[in-house]
Image (cartoon, grey):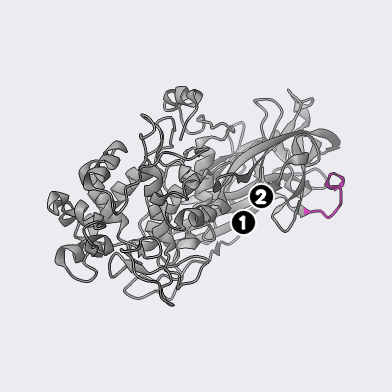
Amino acid sequence: MYLLPTLLSLSSLAKALNPKTILDKNGISLWEKIEEMERQLLQPATLVSLVSPCSTNFGASPFQGQQTSAEWVRLVFHDCITKNIEGPGLGGLDASIGFESGRPENVGIFIDVSIGQFDQFTSVYLSMADLIGVGLADSLATCAPSSRRLALRVGRVDATRAGPFGVPGPADSLDFATAAFQRAGFSKTEMIQAVACGHSIGGVHGSDFKGIGAEGTEENESGRIPFDTTPGIFDANNINEYLNITGSKGGPLVTANETFNSDFRIFNSDHNATVAAMRTPSTFENTCFNIFDKMMNTVPDAVTLSDPFQVRPFIMRQSSLDLTSTGILVFNGTISAHAPSPPDTVSYTYVKTTGSNLGEKVTDIGVELPGFFDSRPPIPPQEPVYIGFNTIKDYKFADIIGSEPVKSLIITSPGATYTGDINTNIFILPSQSHRQLHQDGIGSWMVRVAIHNTLTPPPAPPTVTAYYPTPQDGSKASMVVSATAPLSFETNLGNYKIYKASSFTGDFPAARVGSLAVFKVSAGPTLVATKLSTSDFANTCSAVDISAC
């Protein structure tokens, strides 16, 4: 990936800042990305559902032979391993792999299929490269017997073109593979660990690697030969079967002829010392999580990643300010919690600008989210599981704020660490904003915004900017673009002036804004509303001219 010199010059400055002040080119902070990732992870219907259970081939025939979790692990390796080939500090996990699916070193359908799966969740908050990273974490969580999750970082920047060639393959020499890993920042020992860890799940497909995989059959169309006897479990069986010459004996990249037995060459390069040190379940998992963490965070030097984080016990999944038809200010949303036994309700309070609060409030009774049935031994449980998060519950709340000068909401339940800012000076009105999504998920929209009377006229003409994914040439990954429209005054309501704009104003007539669009409203650099997405709009409208809604 080629990064602009401007980004390179800013990186050293950004690293000294906190996540709320480190902004990307769209003005999205690392903190906003962290919060969006938390929301994704506590929603079982997102990425983790595609790799649950570990052995699944999502959205395709079970006889095809592919394994989604293994494909996602492979994707990370193929994307990050070409770091520094094009120049010092360039390349790494940057989603350039999306432009490289036609290369012989990337043979198979895994790139286009995987990128297409991740692309469902691309937004201005989450880059494709960040989604590839969380895909690795989800795969390990569904495949590891412990359901352990990698700590995550966000802030990866997507490449805009293909990166260099240089992914080692089965026929490449030990020297070639060693040089590729060393160039990317991995020692010889780490190379052995990475291969052993990556080849714990999945297998080799004869349809892609003739002479290594098997011939296709009715029940194994791609001719997959697994790496070990437990390809749907992330465990040390592959190296134990290799060392003991049992079961799959280390898999097809060990047992293949001398030309293609790359795993044997790599494992045996230190007389099996590294793999022998990984034989127990705990040493295997700990070693692999360390090496996968390094791979996932091998990024271009100009990229500033967040600090590692795990999902907080309580988060705000969704929230918004709104006005009733009579102009009364309300705040409502959904709190999510994960724990072995989440509470029946969640306590919280609103903090005023004076520092005092509005007293303790309590949510509705929590609703447990549906989990997945686990396929890992010894016996699949009868109750659904939540991969790495115990039990997840959602708690709805709705409160009248009125004229109280609130500035934040704090969750006060035991174990909570959540504080969320509330800006009552300017906000999008979800109940008075509309969308028209067509069958292709693209359509028109109309947004209304409230600006407090004490701030009108606003310090600058108010505008709305929509950030939305759109197709790009050469990759299955969408790119995020933006369009801006002016907001025009419409009416007064309570203590607020109401402004509106629609997809037929400003830059938008040519824009294709879908359900993943995120809207930012501002009236100068200091008067900025909390962002909302199209999915937060409460109403649909069938009018030919949506601006009339």
User: From where the camera sits, is residue 412 visible?
Assistant: no
User: From where the camera sits, is residue 252 visible?
Assistant: yes
Which residue type carries mark 1? Lys
Q: Is residue 15 left or right of residue 499?
A: left
Q: Which residue is mark 1?
A: 396
Mark 1: few, some, or many residues within 10 Å (few <14, many ≥20)? many
In magenta, the rendered stretch is 540-549
Q: Is residue 227 left or right of residue 409?
A: left
CB under 8 Å between callouts 1 and 2?
Answer: yes
* In front of the other: 377 or 474: 474
Q: Is residue 8 above or below residue 129?
A: above
* In front of the other: 272 or 425: 272
Please, what secondary structure does the residue beneath circle 1 have? strand
Please, what secondary structure does the residue beneath circle 2 have? strand
Mark-to-mark CA distance, 1 and 2: 8 Å
Q: Which residue is mark 2?
A: 332
Which is nearer the N-term, disc 1 or disc 2?
2
Q: Is residue 308 above or below residue 204?
A: above
